[in-house]
């Protein structure tokens, strides 16, 4: 392993790798404008002999996928990630006059490249593509195939989008499925090069509590929705404590409900309505249907004898109508332990097997394609979606060399 690691490391063209990532960041691809980045990927994937295919999941919103075909006898490894990013509202104002002012400029400051998408997740996409450059420069011929699929509509910040339409389409695409049968997938969400075989599930609920407004001088003629909401909140927080006390996952932790917004009243009158928003975290093996039923029972219990009614909307359906399913696969799968060990060799302190503190689209691959999937890529989720998004260049370089070695080990070579 040491000889292969050393050989691949010698092939790393740092300037080329930086140029690849900076070029990706320069292509603004806020959700809905994925095509702008896909055009860049089409050129880069073609240059690496991946024969890319574009397929629209919605009008003017394409996915792109391609494959490096091996000589035969090996497995198919898939690298996958989303092409869209969140918005840049407030970025220029925060950094006005600073070299970071352009959110798509990609300046390197103190060993980190700044800009929207550097971490989430153009860094991961470029890491996977740049790994091929090392394999080619080393003159290595693979037995197995390496597939790449880059899809849109993962981020949820733009109205009317962010419902995983891209991967939903990909995992039902005849064109993709005919050419690609992955045995293992790496979804390149930022993990700081840790390996995440498990992730939380979630749903978001918007609750409207409906009473009756009345002039403040005659409150007996109204039904106070804000007062009723207090009882509902008590029930929700009690349910959250109950959930946390009865379950724990070694990698994902405990489930809970977080109330994220309460809005009601505002006039000199009995509040006739109150709105609550919350997000619920679930563990692998837990049912979204059961969790939603428990929540609704809690709301009903809180409103008992208040005279109020309620409605609930679940706006964040993904692979499930209510939200995103939790998933986990065995952390002892050979591909997972191999990937983790390789990363640690390339960057000590990384390669830890852990759980994702977020939800992304692995369930589509695990459930529909029966493809074991992990999250792994450079980038720190803590600064993604913020006005300080950036990626460590050392981590990026280590990811490139580690991914290159993993590809060779997983797919096999003529010499093995």
Image (cartoon, helix red, strand yellow):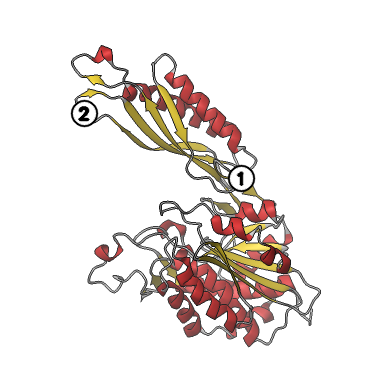
Q: Residues within 10 Å of mark 2 (few under 14, many from 20)?
A: few
Hey, which quadrant is residue 50 in on the image?
bottom right
Q: Residue 299, relative to residue 259: is it above or below?
A: above
- Does any portion of residue 296 appear in the rendered image? yes
In the depicted view, which residue is nearer to us: 403 or 353?
403
List x then y, in percent, for residue 198: 61, 51
Q: Looking at the figure, which quarter contains the N terminus?
A: bottom right
Give the numbered dot on residue 250.
Answer: 1
| Residue 261 image offset from top left, x and y in percent | 36, 38
**Residue at 51% across, 66% down:** 378
Determine the secondary structure under disc 1.
Answer: loop
Pointer 2 residue: 267
The residue tagged with tag 2: helix, strand or loop?
A: loop
Left or right of residue 178, residue 359 in this image:
left
Task: Using a 10 Å C-alpha cutoff, classify the residue at mark 1 as few (fewer than 14 neighbours), some (14 to 19) or many (20 or more).
Answer: few
* Observer able to see residue 331: no
How many numbered discs, if any? Answer: 2
Residue 309, percent across and down?
Answer: 42, 22
Q: Residue at 34% across / 29% down in the picture? A: 274
Residue 143, given in percent of the width and then of the height, sits at: 76, 77
Mark sitting earlier along the chain (1/2): 1
Q: What is the residue that sits farthest to the front in this orientation? A: 59
C-alpha separation, residue under disc 1 versus residue under disc 2: 48 Å
Q: Nearer the viewer, residue 405 or 61?
A: 61
**Residue depicted at 68% across the width and 87% down the height:** 139
């Amino acid at each position: 392993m040491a000889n292969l690691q050393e050989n691949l490391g010698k092939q790393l063209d740092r300037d080329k790798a930086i140029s690849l990532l900076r070029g990706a960041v320069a292509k603004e691809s806020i959700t809905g404008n994925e095509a702008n980045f896909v055009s860049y990927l089409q050129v880069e994937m073609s240059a690496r002999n991946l024969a890319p295919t574009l397929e629209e999941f919605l009008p003017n919103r394409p996915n792109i996928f391609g494959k490096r075909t091996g000589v035969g006898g090996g497995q198919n490894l898939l690298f996958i990630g989303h092409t869209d990013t969140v918005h840049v509202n407030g970025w220029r104002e925060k950094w006005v006059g600073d070299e970071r002012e352009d959110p798509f400029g990609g300046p390197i400051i103190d060993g980190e490249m700044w800009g929207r998408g550097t971490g989430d997740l153009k860094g991961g996409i470029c890491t996977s593509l740049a790994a091929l450059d090392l394999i080619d420069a080393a003159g290595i011929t693979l037995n197995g195939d390496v597939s790449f699929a880059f899809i849109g509509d993962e981020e949820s910040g733009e109205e009317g989008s962010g419902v995983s339409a891209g991967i939903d389409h990909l995992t039902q695409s005849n064109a993709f499925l005919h050419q690609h049968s992955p045995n293992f997938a790496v979804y390149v969400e930022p993990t700081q090069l840790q390996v995440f075989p498990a992730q939380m599930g979630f749903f978001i609920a918007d609750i409207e509590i409906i009473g009756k407004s009345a002039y403040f001088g005659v409150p007996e003629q109204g039904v106070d929705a804000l007062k009723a909401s207090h009882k509902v909140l008590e029930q929700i927080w009690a349910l959250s404590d109950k959930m946390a006390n009865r379950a724990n996952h070694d990698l994902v932790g405990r489930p809970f409900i977080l109330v994220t917004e309460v809005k009601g009243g505002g006039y000199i009158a009995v509040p006739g309505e109150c709105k609550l928003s919350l997000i619920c975290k679930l563990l692998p093996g837990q049912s979204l249907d059961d969790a939603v039923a428990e929540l609704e029972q809690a709301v009903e219990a809180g409103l008992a004898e208040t005279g109020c009614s309620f409605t609930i909307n679940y706006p964040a359906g993904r692979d499930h109508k209510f939200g995103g399913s939790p998933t986990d696969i065995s952390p002892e799968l050979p591909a997972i332990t191999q990937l983790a060990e390789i990363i640690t060799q390339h960057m000590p302190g990384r390669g830890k097997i852990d759980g994702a503190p977020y939800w992304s689209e692995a369930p589509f691959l695990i459930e529909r394609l029966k493809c074991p999937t992990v999250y792994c890529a450079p980038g720190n989720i803590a600064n993604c979606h913020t006005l300080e998004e950036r990626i460590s260049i050392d981590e990026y370089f280590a990811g490139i060399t580690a991914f290159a070695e993993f590809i060779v080990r997983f797919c096999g070579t003529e010499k093995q």
